[in-house]
Image: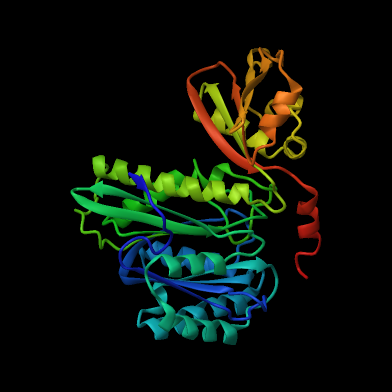
Amino acid sequence: MKKIEGGVTAAAGFYAAATAAGIKYQDRPDMAMIYSEVPCRAAGTFTRNIVKAAPVKWDQKLVAGGAAQAVVINAGIANACTGEEGMGYCQKTAECAGEQLGVPADQVLVASTGVIGMQLPIDRICAGIAAMKPLLAGGRESGQKAAQAIMTTDTHKKEAAVTLALGGKTVTIGGMCKGSGMIHPNMCTMLSFVTTDAAISQELLMEALRADVEDTYNMISVDGDTSTNDTCLLLANGLAGNQEITEKNEDYAAFCAALHAVNEMLAKQMAGDGEGATALFEVTVTGAATKEEAKCLAKSVITSNLTKAAIYGHDANWGRILCAMGYSGAQFDPEKVDLFFQSAAGRIQIMKDGVAADYSEEEATKILSEPEVTAIADIKQGDVQATAWGCDLTYDYVKINADYRS
């Protein structure tokens, strides 16, 4: 497997386009479209929030059918809590795209992100689709433009891609995502679109995605809020020409590893770009007896507002981390815990067997001043580990969300 430059258009046969449709933003592109030369096997995971946006309901129905050839995405308006009118706009969006692309409307997935409760300006949506049709292209530039168009409060585009060999053929997996706030996924997260030219059965495609989101998107948090629109779509068009993966063999394992690499890169980019954030905060719990225990502890730490604030202040306040572990619900002996901080500036042990280690506060502050910071907690109960990703909590998070609708 090899990491490459690229995103949603990296795999063979995938095209993308973007346009400024004026849906909510007046000074930037706010629509994107993904298209495959041929119909794809489709898989998806979606929010577990009871309040589900219309696009989520639309996509859940289509993904159950297993086939898709295009995705239309808009930023600025979430099309959530919009009733039958909102569902009708999903249908209309798919029909407009289907007419432009010559594909059935029931093979057009839709996704929206932005303010909840507003109706989509469907005339602008359809005009945007028409504008994007002649712009559809493969290659790096079109993928980048699409990744930029789906942003809301994101500060930068988010992309990832890898290649691998399957049966003597080069297979590519690439993707783009958006996510900065209202991130505490309970399925996958925000909006994520992954494409591959691998030939794989729809059943195994779905199984691979469902399993992987548990260790990637489901292990990030910015603010503890699970969105109404969380969607992760995975499309496979088979154009790499590898022998179709129909069983859990070595090719399937290699595909899953590559999918994990792409999803983890995308997930970490979202966590690190949390609204107002200045640092990606990674927490690894080692020495656990079970994976569930390790995940529970790691996520409890990255969601602790007190810990997040300490990371922003570059303060090695290890008591907050141990406290967050203590109320996680996982069982462990606090008097056996070792805790370390590490970053590009070095590594330091700040707690040994549940009490403060002899460490330099100055050195700890230096380590915590990097843009990517990791806390490692060894609970000495087994040989299992898990990692979660979050960000620091800053003044700007409140500022951004205090006037989000305006």
Q: Is residue 147 above or below residue 278?
A: below
Question: Residue 23: which quarter of the image?
Answer: bottom right
From the viewer's side, name the closer residue of 188 and 146: 146
What percent of the width, then of the height, locates residue 67? Answer: 35, 66
Q: From the viewer's perspective, is 5 left or right of 250?
A: right
Q: Is residue 164 above or below residue 367?
A: below
Q: Is residue 150 above or below residue 88?
A: above
- Colour scheme: rainbow
From the viewer's side, name the closer residue of 352 and 79: 352
What percent of the width, then of the height, locates residue 58? Answer: 50, 69
From the viewer's side, name the closer residue of 137 and 186: 137
Residue occupying the point 66% across, 29% down = 329
Locate the N terminus and report the quarter of the image it occupies: top left
What percent of the width, then of the height, locates residue 112? Answer: 58, 69
Q: From the viewer's perspective, is 246 left or right of 42?
A: left
Q: From the viewer's perspective, is 287 left or right of 351?
A: left
Locate the C terminus and report the quarter of the image it occupies: bottom right
Residue occupying the point 75% across, 29% down = 320
Residue occupying the point 57% across, 38% down = 388
Q: Is residue 327 visible?
A: no
Question: Residue 7: which quarter of the image?
Answer: bottom left
Residue occupying the point 36% across, 54% down = 173
Q: Is residue 160 visible?
A: yes
What percent of the width, then of the height, locates residue 204? Answer: 32, 50
Question: Residue 257: which quarter of the image?
Answer: top left
From the viewer's side, name the closer residue of 371 and 256: 371
Q: Is residue 291 above or below residue 114?
A: above
